[in-house]
Image (tube, rainbow, N blue to C red):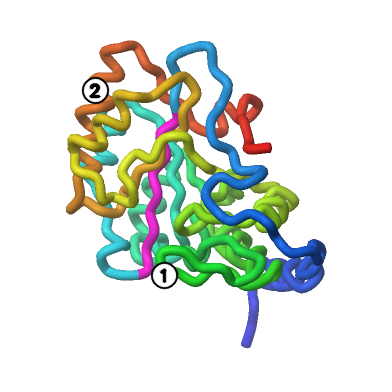
Amino acid sequence: MKFSSLSLLVIATTIIASELHPSPSHQWGENVTGVTTHFSSQEKAIALTFDACGGSAKSSQYDAQLIEFLIDNHIPATLFINARWIDSNPDIFMQLAHNPLFEIANHGTAHKPLSTEGKSIYGIQGTASEAEVIAEIEGNNAKIFALTGKYPHFFRSGTAYYDEKAVAIAREHGMEIGGFSVLGDAGATFSAAQVTQQLMGVHNGDIIVFHMNHPEGGTREGVIEGVNALLKQGWRFVHLSDVKEHLIRIP
């Protein structure tokens, strides 16, 4: 079996760094030490983020009308894309990656919660070691770099669950954890009215998480109504990288 140079780098890094944090973890959740939740802002500015999960026919869908709305209205967004979604939508991924309105971020290789001890959430098994944490991050980093020539700056795990050791490992590998302060669509389960309500309650510096892979849900309609209302109120939308120097992490 032959490996590319990027694959060999991932494997070597995984082996070398597999046991740098020998003590057990003490935190497990969405908001653990080191996770970015919002940014400091004196103006009416927020960051919209959209996950694309992949892995099954349903989770590998694409809400083209939602993305077209963002494009038509010149709304920037950070897109957290999983390696499996890229594999299912290669042409769409490249279109998104080449559009300066969108910043591509890493949503994991196999969409696993990021654990150093094999913890699970929502019935989804997390990574089981430091080596697996690194592989979950770097596998998709390598894929995105091979396709775009750029490494992502932000990572969000499948389910957005972490332990604090996994977050520390990600940050050691140059990744900022893309958490959030507003649950925009609850995994694409909110109705359109609920999605709009979430947007109507934002504050300066909020980071909102939505999904762009469930066109059957209420996300699109709710985002369109909510964003249009925010535009009328004078709100500005930013990429996470635009406010990188002002990000606020959980201590």
The image shows residue 87, relative to residue 228, as above or below, that is below
Numbered range of the magenta stretch: 47-55
The image shows residue 228, relative to residue 213, as above or below, that is above
Left or right of 171 in this view: 232:
left
Q: Residues within 10 Å of mark 2 (few under 14, many from 20)?
A: few
Q: Which residue is mark 2?
A: 228
Residue 195 bears which disc, if any?
none
Residue type (three-letter) at the residue carrying disc 2: Asn
Q: Earlier in the sequence, mark 1 or mark 2?
A: 1
Q: Secondary structure at mark 1?
A: loop
12 or 55, which is in the foreground? 55
Left or right of 14 in this view: 192:
left
Left or right of 32 in this view: 55:
left
Query: Does residue 84 show up?
Result: yes
Determine which quarter of the picture holds residue 59: bottom left
Residue 123 bears which disc, if any?
1
Q: Is residue 49 magenta?
A: yes
